[in-house]
Amino acid sequence: MSDQAAPGMPGSPEDWSGYLARTRWFAGKGRPFRVTGAERLGLLPGSVDGGPRVVLDLVEVAYDDEAAARGGDQARERYQVPLACYPDAQQRLDHAFVGWWEDPELGWVHAYDAAHDREAAACWLRSFDRAAREPDGTLTDGALTFHRLPGHDLDLEATSTLFSGEQSNSSLAFGEDALMKLFRKVTVGTNPDIEVHAALTRAGSEHVAALRGWLDARDPASGETLQLAMLQAYLRTASDGWELALASVRNLFTSEDLHAREVGGDFSAEAARLGTALAETHAVLAEHFATDRLTGDDAARLAAAMEARLDDALAAVPELAAHEGALRSLYAAVAALPEVAVQRVHGDLHLGQTLRTVEGWKLVDFEGEPARPLHERVLPDSPWRDVAGMMRSLDYAPHVVARTLAEGDPAWAEQLHERAAEWSHRNRNHFVNAYAGRGLTDEERTLLAAYEADKAVYETVYETRNRPSWVQIPLAAVARIGA
Ligand SMILES: Nc1ncnc2c1ncn2[C@@H]1O[C@H](COP(=O)(O)OP(=O)(O)O)[C@@H](O)[C@H]1O
Ligand SMILES: O=P(O)(O)O[C@H]1O[C@H](CO)[C@@H](O[C@H]2O[C@H](CO)[C@@H](O)[C@H](O)[C@H]2O)[C@H](O)[C@H]1O
């Protein structure tokens, strides 16, 4: 990448820095970074008269901290920035304004984040539709290739809505027909979300939204493939698992004299169904991806990754130091296990990655944890990582509601946190019992406890960077795990 202002960039790399820092999806917030360049991947086909020209740019960021000093994926990142370019200012898109400049390909442009622009979104939709009409289901235009799976005609009249909320990528719904996810942080090679959705869709799994297509680009730097977007069936009847859990907790908290098992909004049957859905998904993943049994140094590698994460987290969250000893002995118990069965897993499972539809629970977002390097995220891992992720989330939900309701009232906070612990205990038990279908072995308990601790450590860093007022939730969990 060049250090010069590249075509299509706002005047200088500093301008990109300000823009990136304002977005939700930029993962480098809280780390010292600088923009080192930008490149044009291509112009989306499918533009119409009077509509925007949509360019896909790639912005490179370099970090200057301890994690970066160790090199690898932590030192540099590249982000996809699709821009809707117009010759004139578009007031309706003021909230998504990126800048205006003289573009060598397009002349003077007013550029907006294209994910916010329905006219721009229609260009992706038309291109995916054209791909389906090609004999091999692909449409190539310059460095961009649209791929489609057979079996569904897209609704070209559907207008797009950008999902708001706390997301690492940008997801656009096309009416109630399709959902396109634009990957923001991109890495050369196969995107795990696309790869896993493709495998589960082909296997007829009931627990994912069917994959309908994806968009690849040729990386100008390496010539290799970058995967930029995924198109899926839109789940019309979906309710977000996180929101359902919060509603159940609120229900408990408003019935002061009742226990979790007695209130109308009891979540335990849903928690159990989630456990079964995860077990079935793991079974299909084990059939379609590599599995292994790690022993000796290979098993110790899992524990070493947890140790390394703790080392980084201690620098970012000093409060973790009080629990360092307990965490390290938990990880040492993992290193001492005689054997660990590993397979492809979800990697970042929490309630926000689950949707309850009339057909049951669906799991979304198989990209793994955004903070981990890609090569680690796709390695076979213990399925207990996913169980632990969901167990953490079933602990988060009641404590989030408790802290919101009891703000500024310590006595009430104590009471609510006790009731939160009851909700958490009940639903975690239902979930894990349904997942395993039997009691856990000692080895499984060790793995589950260690993965929960590792996830809670990750969460302390995530919250410190993104939602500092929530950091007490994972910190309290670390303290309990270490007690
Ligand atoms: N196929 C789908 N249909 C409807 N909503 C979906 C679908 N897939 C994901 N979602 C919703 O979109 C949100 C963002 O998806 P997700 O894959 O988690 O994105 P990110 O990688 O940005 O976190 C999810 O919280 C979920 O509510
Ligand atoms: O953006 P992603 O969905 O890939 O995941 C990141 O953001 C999540 C928050 O949206 C974060 O999850 C944490 O908060 C959840 C409540 O908002 C809670 O249910 C999870 O248990 C907790 O880990 C996730 O860790 C992060 O990777």
Image (cartoon, rainbow, N blue to C red):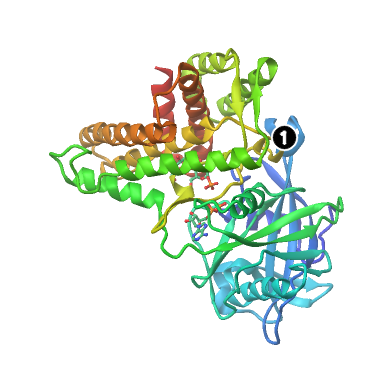
State the image coordinates of residue 380 (x, y, percent, origin top left). 65, 33
119 lies above or below 148: below
State the image coordinates of residue 320 (x, y, percent, origin top left). 49, 24
Find the residue positioned furthest to the bottom: 49
Looking at the image, which residue is at 41% across and 28% down? Answer: 477
Mark 1, Cα crowd under 10 Å, few <14 / some 14-19 / many 20+, is: some
Q: How many numbered badges does the structure rendering display?
A: 1
Q: Quadrant of the C terminus?
A: top left
Looking at the image, which residue is at 76% across and 77% down? Answer: 108
State the image coordinates of residue 110 (x, y, percent, origin top left). 69, 75
Q: Is residue 252 left or right of residue 275?
A: left
Q: Is residue 347 left or right of residue 405?
A: right
Q: Is residue 160 left or right of residue 402?
A: right
Looking at the image, which residue is at 57% across and 77% down? Answer: 155
Amino acid under disc 1: Ala
Q: Is residue 452 visible?
A: yes
Along the viewing direction, whichever of 450 and 476 lies nearer the viewer: 450
Along the viewing direction, whichever of 179 and 49 lies nearer the viewer: 179
State the image coordinates of residue 191 (x, y, percent, origin top left). 69, 49
- Say what secondary structure mark 1 lies in: helix
Along the viewing direction, whichever of 372 and 320 lies nearer the viewer: 372
Q: Is residue 469 visible?
A: no
Name the image quarter holding residue 406: top left
Q: Which residue is mark 1?
A: 68
